Image (spheres, rainbow, N blue to C red):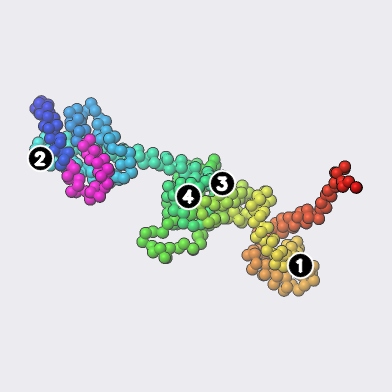
Amino acid sequence: MAEQEELKPQQLAWLRRISGDLSTQVTRALDDRLPWYRTMPPSRRSAVGLVAQSGITSFIAWHEDPEAQPWIAADVFAAAPRELLRSVSLQQTLQLIRTTVAVFEERIGDADPAMREPILRYSREIAFAAADVYARAAESRGLWDARLEALVVDSILTGEHDDELPSRSAALGWHGRGECAVLVGLAPRTVDVDVIRRKARHAGCDVLIGVQGTRLVVVIGRAAPSTDEPVAEAPEHEPIDFLAIAAQLAEGFGEGHLVLGPPVPSVVEAARSARAALAGFAVADAWRRTPRPVRADDLLPERALAGDPLARTDLVRGIYQPLRDHSSDLLATLACYLDTGRSLEATARELFVHPNTVRYRLKRISEIIGWDATGAREALALHTAIILGSVQDATRDRTQRQPQPTRHAPRGKGPVAG
């Protein structure tokens, strides 16, 4: 032990004397052994060389007193510019450390075998310091991404977004390849976003996740095709079964209703899907057998009765107006069929037609609007649409028939007889 203490001043003097040659050998070894180092821009190579030089200086200071300055290893990376962490991966940093340590062993360890143990101890400290630097950077990036993602989802829900929404979404990994839809449900006590993201990757979708109070909101979109997939065969125009994807993501939500908004062409228009999903989520309890998940459009009657203007517009435009514009007989038949409790015979008697005529007209109605009046749930939506459309037409007719006030010339302003 006493001999080691006597040798340390000599070792330190020798290390300081060869530090310049050691730095040159490390730079040469990096250029020879690391292909990614050779292809880096000069500024980045200079930064990496600065880290290597700091490692040499730090090793000498650490060897002088390993206990008094435990932070020296971490200071090696403090000299590197911040952008170096984004351009050099953790794997490349470990290769850099391994190459530097190898040069240390070749130049120092072979000349003085007593220095091998200090080199190994210091390399361990450097490795832990590198892991700590990258862990802190990843944690900081994760917190920033979480805040940015919450901001993007909030702007989609409120509809108050600007032209930066696509770029912000792209920064979060959103590829923006066509349709998207918004899924709303209750948030569990502990939101595990990794489960949702893993399910989304398995389904080939992008997701943006946000927690709004007790609600968990997920924006679902088509992910980019793999690099191995030919561009000509990319499923650009194939429809996405968002309901099936929502069922796969249901595991990440809490108990309760799960409402899926209608698909929209892009994330810029996702606010429309979000409004429908939120409106459906608010009235989902009104349907006694609400499936999980459920489309917001399947809750159009409840949403319309709750005062949702979007649902009222969809019902009138999608059901009432096409039938009114196509044939008054079809609209009258549907209204009579629903008023008589969906009875073919009662409808036929009231309209003075054969029951087969009623069947034919109901079939035509289904072909025109895509709704089947014989189903109890769809009959509710059809009946609601007819009531809303009739009220709208009656209000417009009453407004048009209302007499306009007659304008009289002001007194004393008439023509003067001459």
Compute the Cα span from label 2 to label 1.
103 Å
Amino acid found under the numbered disc labelled 1: Thr
Amino acid found under the numbered disc labelled 3: Gly
Q: Position of residue 275 (x, y in %)?
A: 59, 49
Q: Quadrant of residue 98?
A: top left
Badge nearest the viewer, 1 or 3: 3
Q: Earlier in the sequence, mark 4 or mark 2?
A: 2
| Residue 216 placement, left or right of 143 | right
Give yes or no for contact between labels 2 and 1 (Cβ–Cβ under 8 Å). no
Amino acid found under the numbered disc labelled 4: Pro
Amino acid found under the numbered disc labelled 2: Asp
Q: Earlier in the sequence, mark 2 or mark 1?
A: 2
Q: Residue at x 23, y 43 (%)?
A: 96
Q: Is residue 78 magenta?
A: no
Compute the Cα span from label 4 to label 2.
58 Å
Q: Which residue is mark 4?
A: 166
Q: Which residue is mark 1?
A: 347
Q: Residue at x 72, y 57 (%)?
A: 389
Give yes or no for contact between labels 1 and 3 (Cβ–Cβ under 8 Å). no
Residue extending farthest to the right is 417
Q: Nearer the viewer, residue 47 or 338?
A: 47
Q: Which residue is mark 3?
A: 159
Q: Earlier in the sequence, mark 1 or mark 3?
A: 3
Give yes or no for contact between labels 3 and 4 (Cβ–Cβ under 8 Å). no
- Which segment did they paint magenta? 26-55
Badge nearest the viewer, 2 or 1: 2
Q: Is residue 236 in view? A: yes
